[in-house]
Amino acid sequence: TENLLGLAGPEGEERPRRARSTAEPPMFSNADLLEVFVPGGRPPVLKPGQARLVKAGSDVLFQIHYTATGKPEQDRTQIAFQFTNEPPKEQVRAGLVFNQRFTIPPNASGYLVEGQALIKRDVKLLSMLPHMHLRGKDFEFRATYPSGETEVLLRVSRYDFHWQINYYLAEPKLLPAGTILSCRAHYDNSANNPDNPDPNKAVHYGPQTWDEMINGFFEVIVDPAQGAGDFVGPVKVAGKTGK
């Protein structure tokens, strides 16, 4: 399994693979993610007073990216829930910044791909999880605040596909409404990358490990009384891709 997404939604509702927007290309998702499993990842443990909302009657869905081995395999996927006995003080929600339209040229050693999204209301940033595949080199989360000030929130200078970590902030950080959350990633498609399946191949977005992704998963804290509704939206100027 290359990765696994756990989602919750109304019973019987057909779930879109990605949120649609007027941005070109779409670069964000408000999907009701419960958990993301990736190589090296660990189950999250929320603090007392924090909880996710799973509405009564919801379906729990798995989106699993399998990689074929050429022989029958057994899937032993499980998910477990710990329920709170008291109303939470903080609701935890998940968002995603991504880009699906890029081509990494053959033998490129530092190709840049970007994605960005608009934070539509005040939230507190709780965690960030960079996700790429075997050609991933480095990954950065950056905030551009309504004042115009920019801040690097997380920089993983030596990304390792085999150890993908969800980075929790020591203290949640306010992202005011109007903040642009950007993800910038470099890819090594050269022969110097020992994990590279084929340096002579142009690489596009895709679910298989030999394809590539730029997924910036993140979690935020919202007021449970105001938790419903989208908190991520499109940016008018689409993210750039290039060297």
Image (spheres, helix red, strand yellow):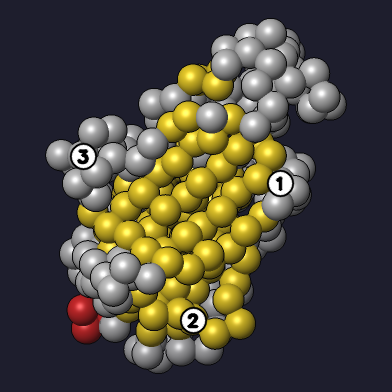
Q: Which residue is mark 1?
A: 159
Q: Secondary structure at mark 1?
A: loop
- First in sequence: mark 3 or mark 2? 3
**From the viewer's perspective, is residue 156 above or below residue 209?**
below
> Which residue sits at x=53%, y=67%?
153
Tell me which amino acid carries mark 1: Tyr
> Which residue sits at x=69%, y=16%?
107
Q: Which residue is mark 3?
A: 23
Residue sitting farthest toward the left: 22
* Location of residue 17 in the rendering, given as x and y in whole percent from the top left corner: 33, 35
Q: Nearer the viewer, mark 3 or mark 2?
A: 3
* Location of residue 197 in the rendering, given as x and y in whole percent from the top left corner: 74, 17
**From the viewer's perspective, is residue 83 above or below residue 130?**
below
How many residues crowd around disc 3 within 10 Å: few (fewer than 14), some, or many (20 or more)? Answer: some
Q: Secondary structure at mark 2?
A: strand
Q: Which mark is residue 172?
A: 2
> Which residue sits at x=75%, y=48%?
158
Asked which quadrant contains residue 13, the reply is top left
Tell me which amino acid carries mark 2: Pro
- First in sequence: mark 1 or mark 3? 3
Label 1 close to label 3 by CB (< 8 Å): no
**From the viewer's perspective, is residue 139 above or below residue 95?**
above
Image quadrant in which the N terminus is located: top right
